[in-house]
Amino acid sequence: MSDITFSKTGMSLTLADGRPGYVNYFWLRDNCPTSFDPGTHERIYEIRTAPDDLHPLDAHVADGALHVTWSDGNHRSRYDLAWLTEWIRRPGRDDAAALTRRYWKGDHFDRIRRFGHADVLADDGCLTDWIEVLLVEGIAIVTDLPDTDEALEQLANRVGIVRPCIDGYFLDIEAKPDGHSLSFTDAALEIHTDIPSEELAPGIQFLHCRANTVAGGQSLFVDGGAVAEDFRREYPDEFAILSQNDMPFYYDHDSYDLRARQRVIELDATGAVSGITLSGHMQDILDFDQRFMDRYYPALIRFHRMLQDPKYCMSFRMQEGQCLVFDNHRIAHGRSAYDGGGGRRKLRLCYLDRGEMRSRYRTLTRRRVKADVA
């Protein structure tokens, strides 16, 4: 007891590293090991049931653990002191999927990592490496996909569950006489991210090239993170405008009317660029104050122009059997126009959530660590 002092709201004690630390009573009671179901790992204790004057009746350190008897029904808790020290000194779970992004520019095509379709399906080690590349570089190519509908579904299901967009779970992208989107024509597509008109725009995009015998139709890919970071450095005021204001997008047809607001440059909790969102063909009429437009439009136009700069933009021809997989919130893409009457160009597309990809990577790396230890 001599190493522990009590206040109305928490206790101070010597932690496993030999230095003093403070811990709140409600946090400590809420995270008693008995608060979690051992099978599901979900919390079963409800902190709302704790008394307003929650406090320890007794607390002491013994055998590398803090032992507490609570005023909350004389409940007894045992906390590993090393665990408690780690949470007080460095709050938050370790996240294997929180990898440092490695940005790239227009000369990256020959360095895009490539993985064989059969290897990804059969080998968890290869699957882990592939997802890691997507987390770090935002893009990878899977090769040798069979020319079947099932090939893409099998590949996507190795990462997570295919999520639908307004047009369905899987889309066949090719020129059609009644195409209701520019994607379903042979016209050029400017650099964009997909479907920002949905409140939760798609996360990971899969593009399986089934046929490509047309003239033209070069694929264009840009690391939006690389552009945004350079934009921040060169034009900080305009960066602030695009990262602090939501702009409207829409996707409007006879059977649906999607609308959402997104930020062109997305930042994470630390202020780092986590992605971009833009689409000239789904951009709605801007509804900012007209005086603010005097500043917003120059910033938006400059950013669009940077994305088109060959310094940043890869241009290449997709090959049959290739599947481009990329982060739709980081990697912008487009295509040049092609001759839809002089051959065939067909891509099969689907989406997954980014959170599912990160979840899959965490579980795979956890298994790998356990196997290495064994």
Image (cartoon, rainbow, N blue to C red):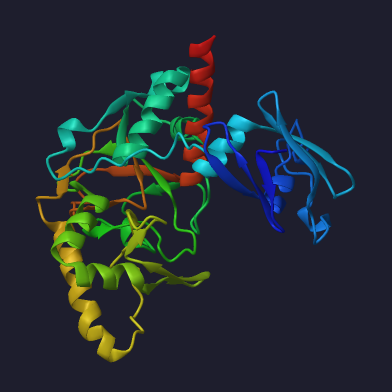
At a point 25% along the width and 78% down the height, the residue shown is 296
At a point 22% along the width and 78% down the height, the residue shown is 297
In the rendered view of the protein, which quadrant contains the C terminus? top right
Q: Quadrant of residue 196?
A: bottom left
- Looking at this view, is 93 or 52 the one in front? 52
Residue 363 position, x and y percent, is: 54, 29
In the rendered view of the protein, which quadrant contains the N terminus? top right
Residue 123, visible in the rendered structure: yes
Q: Is residue 170 above or below residue 184?
A: above
Instruction: Locate residue 224 relative to residue 328 in the image: left or right.
Output: left
Give the residue at the far right of this rendering. 73
Q: Quadrant of residue 250?
A: bottom left
Residue 208, visible in the rendered structure: no
- Looking at this view, is 238 or 319 the one in front? 238
Q: Is residue 287 above or below residue 299?
A: below
Q: Is residue 88 above or below residue 267?
A: above
Q: Is residue 182 above or below residue 118?
A: below
